[in-house]
Amino acid sequence: MADVAIGQIVKAHYRSGTYIGKVVGDKGDRYVVEVLAVKKHPMQGDLHNPQQTEGVFFHERKALAFGEKTNVKKAAVHPFNETVPNYNNSLKEAVELYRNKLLQKHSDYNQAALQCLANLEKNYY
């Protein structure tokens, strides 16, 4: 775990997504991170039963919004020393990367995840 300071730009893994943000608070075992960009779109479905569609509640998981603040475990926060991308562009790129990954293999899970992603895109853009 790397120590980071309030105001520092970081990469933060939250749930199944990864974000670029600014540390705006310290809550002991967690940092409060303000989202500036999306690095990896959250996975769709039930995170406790990955790749499954039968007998689980298949969650539609949207990416955190620009400026949204979230509490992230300190172990999942790392310094980010690159240029911070534009939020909208980063979201589109993250969605496209996730879609391309899902299209590589035909499965019930991938089809359900692609449908969720299509629904999310209607609200994103």
Image (cartoon, rainbow, N blue to C red):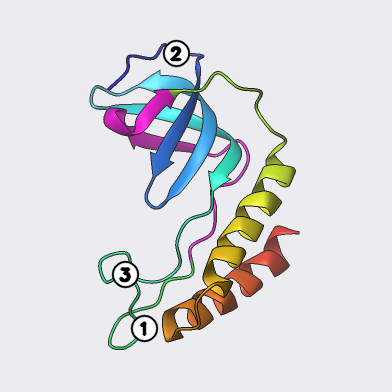
Q: Amino acid at mark 1?
A: Thr
Horizontal placement of 88 versus 53: left or right? right
User: Disc 1 versus disc 3: distance between alpha carbons?
Assistant: 9 Å
Percent of width and height locating residue 70: 43, 38
How far apart marks 3 and 2 lie (CA) works out to 34 Å
Q: Tell me the CA gap for discs 2 and 1.
A: 41 Å
Which residue is painted at 40% across and 77% down in the image?
Answer: 58
Residue at which label 2 appears: 6
Q: Amino acid at mark 3?
A: Pro
Label 3 Cα neighbours within 10 Å, binned few <14 / some 14-19 / many ≥20: few
- Mark whose residue sits in front, 3 or 2: 3
Please identify the quarter of the rendering in which residue 123 is found. Answer: bottom right
Percent across and percent down for residue 92 are 70, 53
The mark closer to the camera, 2 or 1, is: 1
Using residue 123 as the reference point, say whether residue 111 is left or right of it.
Answer: left
What residue span does the magenta drawing correspond to?
61-78
Along the line of sight, the residue nearer the viewer: 64 or 12: 12
